[in-house]
Image (cartoon, helix red, strand yellow):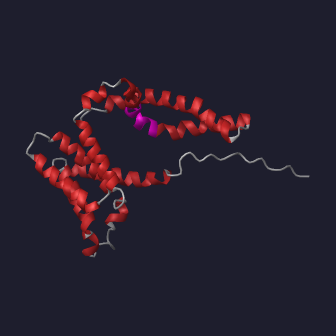
């Protein structure tokens, strides 16, 4: 008589990790642009946005040589990143003659892509910029500022730490779904945040403002 197989529960924490390969392509694109066109970095962004909007690569019949859209995974995501760069440029050049050009790009973005959510977020951030100092002084927001500070370290580490903690607890104690949720909230999450904070402090922070 054969014994029944015991199946270990499989926990899917983030089904969107297939996007990492696309992130690598995106980072590669930005790195190459910085390396080759550091002085004209944002103008190249404007040019890429125009290419995507008018779909120039396909019109020139070059899609068999290099599918510009697909290789860099730009059509659905680039405009969101571009909106962020526009916010940065407007804030940086607020008292500069370049502001007019940045505002023209913003108007083009709003009417070309018609993404109400991204546009709303970008404009909301621009409005908040005028209240920066007051917002920084709000006590109840300090935990969110800390969380934002370590967010990239948390992004890098959580997939390494959290599943292993919960997987170990499931194997040791045969937990049900509700118990797994409790383990996550009161043990795995605090441990992950703690490790991410010190990872940020000793590994990420020393390089944050270093000129390369």
Query: Splitting the image into 4 quarters, where does residue 191 fall?
Result: top right
- Location of the C terminus by quadrant is top left
Q: Residue at x 19, y 40 (%)?
A: 91
**Does 129 appear above or below 3?**
above
Q: Identify the magenta region.
A: 147-155
- Between 181 and 188, the residue placed more toward the observer is 181
The answer, for residue 212, to whether it is visible in the render is no
Query: Splitting the image into 4 quarters, where does residue 66 fall?
Result: bottom left
Image coords of residue 182 (percent x, y) = 63, 33
Q: Main secondary structure of the magenta part?
A: helix
Q: Residue at x 23, y 43 (%)?
A: 88
- Between 86 and 191, the residue placed more toward the observer is 86
Q: Is residue 21 left or right of residue 136?
A: right
Q: Give the mark count.
A: 0
The answer, for residue 7, to whether it is visible in the render is yes
Q: Residue at x 83, y 50 (%)?
A: 4
Q: Is residue 166 magenta?
A: no
Image coords of residue 116 (percent x, y) = 32, 55
- Between 93 and 211, the residue placed more toward the observer is 93
Query: Splitting the image into 4 quarters, where does residue 147 fall?
Result: top left
């Amino acid at each position: 008589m054969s014994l029944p197989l015991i199946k270990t529960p499989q926990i899917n924490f983030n089904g969107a990790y297939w996007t990492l390969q696309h992130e690598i392509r995106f980072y590669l694109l930005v790195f190459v642009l910085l390396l080759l066109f550091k002085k004209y970095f944002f103008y190249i962004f404007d040019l890429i946005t125009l290419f995507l909007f008018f779909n120039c690569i396909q019109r020139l019949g070059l899609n068999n040589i290099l599918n510009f859209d697909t290789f860099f995974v730009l059509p659905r995501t680039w405009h969101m990143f571009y909106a962020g760069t526009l916010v940065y440029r407007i804030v940086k050049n607020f008292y500069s003659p370049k502001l007019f050009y940045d505002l023209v790009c913003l108007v083009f973005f709003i009417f070309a892509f018609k993404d109400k959510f991204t546009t709303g977020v970008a404009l909301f951030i621009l409005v908040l910029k005028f209240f920066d100092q007051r917002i920084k002084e709000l006590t109840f927001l300090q935990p969110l500022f800390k969380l934002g500070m370590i967010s990239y370290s948390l992004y890098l580490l959580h997939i390494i730490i959290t599943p292993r903690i919960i997987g170990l607890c499931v194997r040791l104690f045969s937990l049900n779904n509700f118990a797994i949720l409790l383990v996550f909230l009161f043990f795995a999450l605090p441990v992950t945040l703690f490790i991410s904070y010190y990872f940020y402090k000793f590994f990420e922070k020393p390089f944050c403002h270093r000129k390369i």
